[in-house]
Image (cartoon, rainbow, N blue to C red):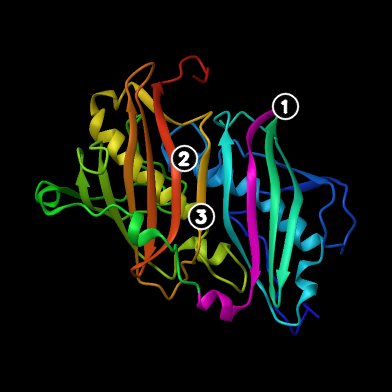
Amino acid sequence: MFDEKRRIARLPGPPYSFLDRITRIEPDAWVLEPAGWIEAEYDIPPDAWYFKANHMQAMPFCILLEIALQPCGWLAAYMGSALKSDKDLKFRNLGGDAVLYRNVFPDVTPLAMRTRLKQLSSAADMIIEQFDMEVLAADQIIYKGQTSFGFFTDEALAQQVGIRDALQSAYRPPHEEILRADSHRFEDTAPMTPEDPLVDPMPTLAMPAKALRMIDEIEIYIPDGGPCGLGFIRGLKIVDPHEWFFKAHFYQDPVCPGSLGIESFLQLIKFMALDRWKYLAESHQFALMTEEPHHWIYRGQIIPENKKIEVEAVVTRIQTEPVPSIMANGFLKVDGLYIYKMENFGFRLIPVARNGQHN
């Protein structure tokens, strides 16, 4: 029925496809119930576009998150989720809790992914599926957590009301903070797209290139703002319906990947770190914070018809020893509606690797 008359949820396509093969399957096909694990693999290309676009040695979080999540989408399809409704259903991530144990570098390949359906609930034409997920390299855990996905009709997605408590919990800078706020407009650097072979030279601490940068400008930056007095920042991005990720994610269902929404939030944290520790620009590099549980919630979507994305971050912790580090919480809004919430993400600034060794 999905060959001609109906639309089915798809996995992302290039350049946002990070699932090369399924290597082991325990559950039975077309049986939608909690069962065993599936195992998959992804080969990291040595010249992967996202390393060049990120202007840092470690894999961007948005890519690692997709590597962990895409086997969940494959398993959802394998179990026959789309067969449970007479209506076409769209597949959306709803959130998760996870821990990053190691940063991923280009020489760490292949990555192995494991996932299993943990819990299932359904009502009318809505299905909610909860998964355990793991990413490993050479049998060592890189990333581990739980995540939930939902199958929804177009009508259900159109009625989403966003993050319910955001208006109460999001930080609003008082007037005296706004008066001393800074702003910044980013210049585009190569690679401009994932296919662009050019790479502009940059310091070892730098914002991502245009191909991966998910904010156009900083509207408000208050280094000592926020509820903890450690920093508040708001970035803006104008939605371009022709951007590469809409074509890649998903076929017949263009939507901005939630992982790129988290990436925009992480880029705000990078900007604040660059400002605070600018004297380390040529001697240090970014590394994602490890051993810290983080959490995300999605209650809405960014589609080509939207106009403006606003991303906010509040710094919750800053340390200088043993290396500079910064942690933050944040929200993302689209056309004024809070739809993403991110908690306990951050970076360490580590000395530049020497002699091919990763710090």
Tell me: 289 left or right of 112. left
Q: Quadrant of the N terminus?
A: bottom right
Q: Is residue 332 above or below residue 272?
A: below
Which circle marks residue 138 in the picture?
1
Tell me: 199 left or right of 21. left
- Which residue position holds label 3? 297
Which kind of residue does numbered mark 3 sit on? Ile
Which of labels 3 and 1 is toward the front? 3
Which kind of residue does numbered mark 2 sit on? Lys
Mark 3 or mark 1: whose residue is earlier in sequence: 1
Q: Which quadrant of the structure image shows residue 306?
A: bottom left
Residue count near mark 2 (Cα–Cα under 10 Å), binned few <14, some 14–19, many ≥20: many
Find out whether the residues at labels 2 and 1 contact each other: C-beta distance under 8 Å.
no
Which circle marks residue 52 in the picture?
2
Residue depicted at 34% across the width and 62% down the height: 167
- Measured as percent of width and height from the top left, residue 46 is found at 59, 35
In the image, is residue 350 part of the stretch drawn in magenta?
A: no
Tell me: 291 left or right of 236. right
- Measured as percent of width and height from the top left, residue 65 is found at 57, 46
Q: Which stretch did the figure color magenta?
A: 140-159
Label 2: element kind: helix
Which of labels 2 and 1 is toward the front? 1
Mark 3 or mark 2: whose residue is earlier in sequence: 2
Q: Does residue 289 appear in this view?
A: yes
